[in-house]
Image: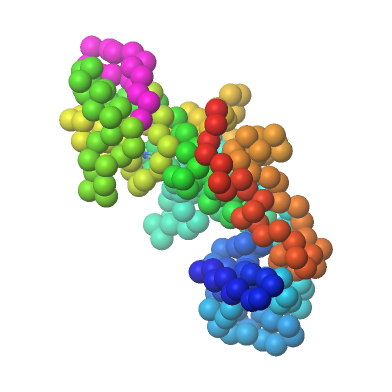
Amino acid sequence: MKQRKAGKAEQRVLKTLERVFSKAGRGSRSEARRWIGEGRVRVNGVTVRSPDHWIDLERDHITLDGKPVTAQRGVYVLLYKPKGYLTTYKDPEGRPTVFDLVQDAGGWLAPVGRLDLDTSGLLLLTNDTAFADHVTSPEHLVPKTYQVKTATLLSEEQLERLRGGVELHDGPTRPATVRRVRDSARHTVIEMVLTEGRNRQVRRMVEAAGSHVLKLVRTAIGPLGIGELGIGRWRHLTDEEIAALGGRRRTAATSNTSEGRPGAKSRSRACNKGRAWKS
Ligand code: URA
């Protein structure tokens, strides 16, 4: 939760204490709640045990185990997720997760959106929550491309339905770009490009069009394709790739969570929030 307090001459950005850690790229909100509950977190020298305590990012000094909580340099990872891996931190049933594949990527990371257990393809992970919000927000129209094998042959009429947007229980989908890649005797392979990322959206759209998905691969996020990336492997994004997705690499701070400088730009302003995707 974020609040703005408007003073006469300034607008102050307030965040809850538990959010400061993910904003700084230091850890998840549940890890932060644990650290706070254990009495390891101080605000301006005083131990605070409430995760909902309001923090002024420009002024308050936060420490964990006596060390300042500084914003970490942004880490941006592109993973080629195989089928059978969950996009979750821990699974109570002990199934493999995407975090098993990126252990050596450096520091705390959170997935940017999700891929289903049975979906393979590109998944971004980052410690930069503003960048993640930017890429997942439907407002910014970052296109995600999927290759879809359907359980039946699809007619031109069915492809038109998918293109026009279909009615789902959580509302109509946006128009999509849909291209027939090939037909076999019993199946069609299509490419779908979506600018929103609702839960199981491709699978639900194909069902609404009267078929179902046999195989689903996310082949691109914006301009980033699979390229030479092997399945189960990851690589860091370049600064140019981060910029092409509408972001900017976060630099490490030196003193506090607002990039180390009083009056520093907030992270959300480091992303081109108002910019719609342009290819
Ligand atoms: N749409 C889906 O149905 N599943 C995914 O994993 C991604 C997009």
Colouring: rainbow
Q: Is residue 94 above or below residue 53?
A: above
**Quarter occupied by residue 23:** bottom right
Work out whether residue 60 or residue 211 is closer to the camera in this orientation and state it: 60
Q: Tell me which secondary structure the magenta stretch mostly adopts.
A: strand
Q: Taking the image as drawn, is residue 8 in sight?
A: yes
Start-end of magenta stretch: 176-190
Q: Is residue 156 above or below residue 102?
A: above
Residue 66 in percent (x, y) is at: 76, 78
Residue 48 in percent (x, y) is at: 62, 85
Q: Residue furthest right?
A: 254
Ligand 1 in which quarter: top left
Question: Is 82 covered by the magenta stretch?
Answer: no
What is the total number of numbered labels drawn onto the structure image? 0
Residue name at image x 65 percent, y 39 percent: 242
Q: Taking the image as drawn, is residue 18 in sight?
A: no
Residue name at image x 54 percent, y 71 percent: 3
**Quarter occupied by residue 50:** bottom right
Question: Is 179 covered by the magenta stretch?
Answer: yes
Q: Is residue 168 above or below residue 213?
A: below
Q: Is residue 76 above or below residue 258?
A: above
Residue 215 in percent (x, y) is at: 34, 29
Residue name at image x 70 percent, y 87 percent: 46
Residue 269 in percent (x, y) is at: 64, 53
